[in-house]
Image (cartoon, grey):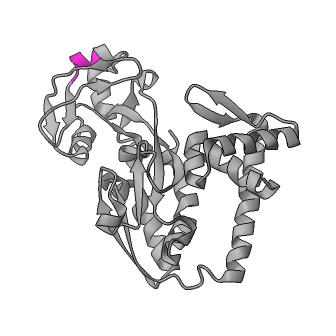
Amino acid sequence: MNPYREMQVFLAVVQAGSLAAAARQLQLSPASVMRSIAALERRLDSRLLLRGPRGVSPSPAGEGFAERCEGILQRVAEAERSVSGLHANPAGHLQVALPLLMIHQVLTPIALDYLAAFPDVSLTTLAREELPRLVEEGVDLALVVGHLPSSSGFAVPLGQVRPLVCAAPDYLQRRGRPDTPQALHAHRIIATSSTGHVADWRFANQQTKLAPRLVCNTAQAAIRAAVAGFGLTRCLSYEVDQELRSGQLQTVLDDFAAAPLPVQLYYREGRRAAARVRSFLDFVVPRLRAHPAFRA
């Protein structure tokens, strides 16, 4: 495998945090990915990846190398596009599926900038909490929270979100901050359930069954109730990104939080994707990766 391809493989592994996920993205076998990384580490005489129970992460040397690889690969891609004109005139209609609060909290400003940059493209956002069927539903791209099935198409990792418990500052001042999940029983709980069945709240090493004072059928309603100071609610970090940054909500029990979840942009056809899809990927991916909502 040539040095350019080794850099592509290494960067895909770092961004995915998993050898298997990178292999699916690159359409290679896991064994090929492992051989490529091993050859790269031998050639550079440096350990670039650290293996752990939750996947792989770059070593200090690997972090610096990954940054340089990303810059080099981006410049090569830009040079190729300037010759081929691949994104010269993307046009047509895009359908992008993503969770409702992801539209409100994260995507809309980025999507408006994209449409300003590409005036011949129109865009429809579809609220989907579950993984859509891209072909059957006519969806071009889907922003997905959680792990994708191994049979999925192409996926670009964007970052992570974390489960959290939060409340308004005035509520915490009046009622105190719970210091363990068991302490939640002394608090007013706001739960979310679209079916009426309230699931236990899961933490890192336990789950807690609670009796909520208020059950909302949407996360948006539960968050509004928490902002109003009614009680504590549980959600994913991206769902309250603006409220946390503005100070309307504060998190509690961070030391007990469950493992973060990956966020990925899922699409079909890979390099054969239409120009409007490729232009959308090139435009939004670096902006989404830099978004504070995806830094769990």
The verdict on residue 17 being magenta is no
Q: Quadrant location of residue 3? A: bottom right
Q: Which residue is nearer to you in this view: 114 or 126?
A: 126
* Image: 76 above or below 287: below
Image side of residue 79 versus residue 279, left or right: right
Q: In this view, does 177 lie above or below 227?
A: above
Residue 230 makes an appearance in the image? no
Q: In this view, does 89 lie to the left or right of 82?
A: left
Q: Position of residue 286 (x, y in %)?
A: 58, 59
Residue 213 visible, this angle: yes
Magenta span of residues:
183-187
Find residue 247 and report its horizontal and vertical position in percent.
40, 41
Q: Please tell me which residue lies in front, 67 or 57.
A: 57
Residue at the image position 21 percent from the left and 34 percent from the top: 191
As rendered, which of 131 and 285 lies closer to the eye? 131
Q: Residue at x 70, y 72 (%)?
A: 78
Number of numbered discs visible in the structure rendering: 0
Identify the residue shown where x is 47% and y is 83%.
Answer: 91
Residue 263 horizontal/vertical position (percent): 46, 47
Image quadrant of residue 8?
bottom right
Vertical arrangement, residue 21 with respect to residue 1, above or below: above
Residue 41 pos. (x, y %): 81, 39
Left or right, 102 with respect to 19, comes to left
Q: Quick one: 213 or 4, which is closer to the camera?
A: 4
Judged by its main secondary structure, the magenta piece is helix
Task: Say which residue appears at 45% left-offset and 30% top-offset.
Answer: 259
